C-alpha cells in the first residue's frame, strides 16, 4: 500500500506498450490530474513482450491523444518486470490475453488481487465476462480503431478514478490510525 512518501501506483499493460497501454496511461494520468490526485498517484505502462521496447508510441495513438491535448512524445515502450507486482497497487490489463499472462506470472495471491481488466471499471461492461471486457489491438487497423480504443478507455476512467480515490483515502485513514 502507498504511504505519504510513496504514491499509489497504477500500471496499464498491453502487448507491446506502443498503442493501448500508453493511451490508457496518459488518459488516466490526465483524469487524475483533473481530480487533483496527481501528487498522490503515479501512473505508468508496460508491455507483456519486449518486441517494441525502446520505441515511441504508435503515431496513430499519438495523433488520437493529441486531439485532446495529451502529449505522448516522452513515451518509450518497455517490457513488464516481475518486481512490479510488488511495487504497483493496481494493474490494469487491456485485454484477456494480458490478464491471463499477468495472472500466470503473478508470484502470489496479493499480486493476483491487484490485476483488473481496465474495462471492468466501465459500468457498461463491468458485468460482462472477462473475454468481453478486452480492448482489441488497433495496431492492425486504422484511425477509427484508435478512436474506438480512446472511447473504451475514456468510458472506464471515472470508475478507475473513483477506485483509486477510495484506495488513497483508505490508505490515508489507515496511516492516520497507525499514528
Image: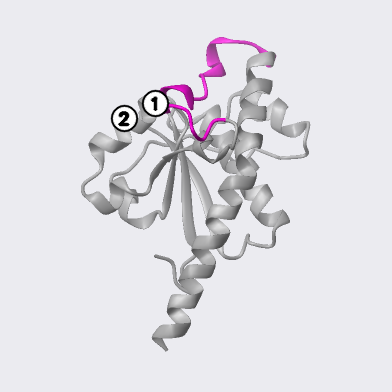
Q: Is residue 167 magenta?
A: no
Query: Mainly helix, strand or loop, the magenta region?
Result: loop
Q: How many marks?
A: 2
Residue density around tag 1, few if under 14, some if 14–19, many if 20 or more, within 10 Å: some
In the figure, is residue 30 to the left or right of 171?
Answer: right
In the figure, is residue 135 to the left or right of 2?
Answer: right
Which residue occupies the extreme left position in the image?
A: 107
Q: Position of residue 162 (x, y in %)?
A: 59, 54
Q: Which residues are magenta?
A: 125-143
> How far, Cα to Cα, is label 1 from label 2?
6 Å
Relative to residue 142, is residue 99 depicted above or below? below
Which residue occupies the extreme front position in the image?
A: 127
Residue ID for mark 2: 100
Q: Position of residue 147 (x, y in %)?
A: 69, 22
Q: Are marks 1 and 2 in contact (CB under 8 Å)?
A: yes
Disc marking residue 1: none
Q: Nearer the viewer, residue 104 or 58?
A: 104
Secondary structure under the numbered disc 1 in the rendered image = helix
Which residue occupies the extreme top position in the image?
A: 141
Residue density around tag 2, few if under 14, some if 14–19, many if 20 or more, within 10 Å: few
- Residue at 52% x, 65% y is 168
In the figure, is residue 113 to the left or right of 9?
Answer: left
Could one spot residue 5 in this view of the protein? no
Residue ID for mark 1: 96
Q: Position of residue 8 (x, y in %)?
A: 48, 61
Secondary structure under the numbered disc 2 in the rendered image = helix
Q: Position of residue 83 (x, y in %)?
A: 29, 50
User: How does the figure colour the protein chain or chains?
Assistant: one colour
- Residue at 72% x, 40% y is 70
- Residue at 65% x, 37% y is 72
Q: Nearer the viewer, residue 3 or 82?
A: 3
Amino acid at each position: 500500500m502507498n504511504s505519504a512518501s510513496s504514491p499509489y501506483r497504477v500500471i496499464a499493460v498491453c502487448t507491446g506498450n506502443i498503442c493501448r497501454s500508453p493511451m490508457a496511461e496518459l488518459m488516466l494520468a490526465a483524469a487524475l490530474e483533473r481530480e487533483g490526485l496527481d501528487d498522490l498517484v503515479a501512473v505508468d505502462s508496460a508491455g507483456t513482450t519486449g518486441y517494441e521496447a525502446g520505441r515511441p508510441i504508435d503515431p496513430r495513438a499519438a495523433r488520437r491523444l493529441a486531439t485532446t491535448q495529451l502529449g505522448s512524445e516522452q513515451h518509450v515502450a518497455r517490457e513488464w518486470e516481475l518486481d512490479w507486482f510488488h511495487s504497483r497497487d493496481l494493474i490494469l490489463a487491456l485485454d484477456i490475453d494480458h490478464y491471463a499472462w499477468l495472472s500466470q506470472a503473478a508470484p502470489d495471491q496479493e499480486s493476483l488481487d491487484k490485476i483488473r481488466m481496465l474495462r471492468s471499471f466501465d459500468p457498461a461492461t463491468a458485468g460482462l465476462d472477462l473475454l468481453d471486457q478486452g480492448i482489441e489491438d488497433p495496431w492492425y487497423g486504422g484511425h477509427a480503431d484508435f478512436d474506438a480504443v480512446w472511447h473504451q478507455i475514456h468510458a472506464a476512467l471515472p470508475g478507475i478514478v473513483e477506485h483509486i480515490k477510495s484506495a488513497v483515502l483508505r490508505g490515508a485513514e489507515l496511516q492516520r490510525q497507525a499514528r
